[in-house]
Amino acid sequence: MKQRLNCIRISFTGFVFLATILFCGCKNISNKETPINEKNDSTKFNGVYKSYRDGYLYSEVTLKDGKKEGLAKKFYKNGRINTEVYYKNNIKVDTSRWYYTDGKIYRETPYQNGVVHGIQKKYHRNRLLKAEIPYVYGKRKVGLKEYSIYNNPVKSYPSISHIITDKRAENRQVILTVRLSNNSQNVKFYQGELEKGIFDTDKIKYILTEKGKGSITFVEKPDFEGKNQINIIAYYKTKNGNYKILHKRIPMPSTHLKE
């Protein structure tokens, strides 16, 4: 009798263990997002690849030889489309679109050879244009346009303000301090030129910016011949959440100033 009870206990324990594994396994399968184009996928897979998250269709993409080809979609939990992105040989092309949860268009972004190129557009929930943001081969360009929910162009933006502290009589130093006229802290300052109006951080120099202020210290050296002015660029995040490029040429008190 005692041996029989022990067998029953072992059988019951085994049943609980097996049920736990099955329950956890099912739970993980229903909640886990199936990755797209990861190492565990066949590089020769052709057809529509679907992934699920928390029990709903999360994404859908057409693969050709394991690479994204054509339209790829992501979905909200309510079944509406979140994003639509077009691919050619795994590279983003044409115009991608993002949507609000109610199905209205939020953003349109043009791609060329995998980078943003052209005018990116954003929309208010009332379907009116919110912003036009110019890009050139993945780089931002001056010319941001923003619009209110009533389709009125936004015209009020801050400008770059500066202060020159001349200490050459004391220690041969000149300190240039820059900030925005509205004292916004949502800004980064740079020094350099905007070639063809393109904001390229590889060709301009970042100015340490803290709490909305940037500062450069120059030392006057008679044997150094520099420029008589300096070009300051501000990369400013507007109230609408877009980045506007501002710039200003500032005359310097000497051509012998070196950083």
Image (cartoon, rainbow, N blue to C red):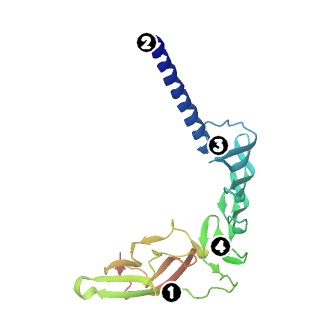
Q: CA distance from mark 1 to mark 4?
A: 20 Å
Identify the image quadrant of residue 100: bottom right
Report which residue position mark 4 lands on: 134
Q: Is residue 251 visible?
A: no
Of marks 2 and 1, which one's residue comes earlier in the chain?
2
The residue that label 1 is drawn on is 159
Foreground disc of the pair 3, 4: 3
Amino acid bearing label 2:
Lys
Residue 119 point in image, percent of width and height = 69, 71
- Mark 4 secondary-structure assignment: strand
Whole-number angstrom distance, CA of label 1 to CA of label 3: 46 Å
- Whether residues under marks 3 and 4 lie with C-beta atoms below 8 angstroms apart, the answer is no
Of tags 2 and 1, the one toward the viewer is 2
Q: What residue does disc 2 label?
A: 2
In this picture, residue 95 sits left or right of residue 225 = right
The nearer-to-camera label among 3 and 2 is 2
- Identify which residue is drawn at 58% across, 32% down: 22
Disc 4 crowd rating (10 Å Cα; few below 14, some 14-19, many 20+) is many
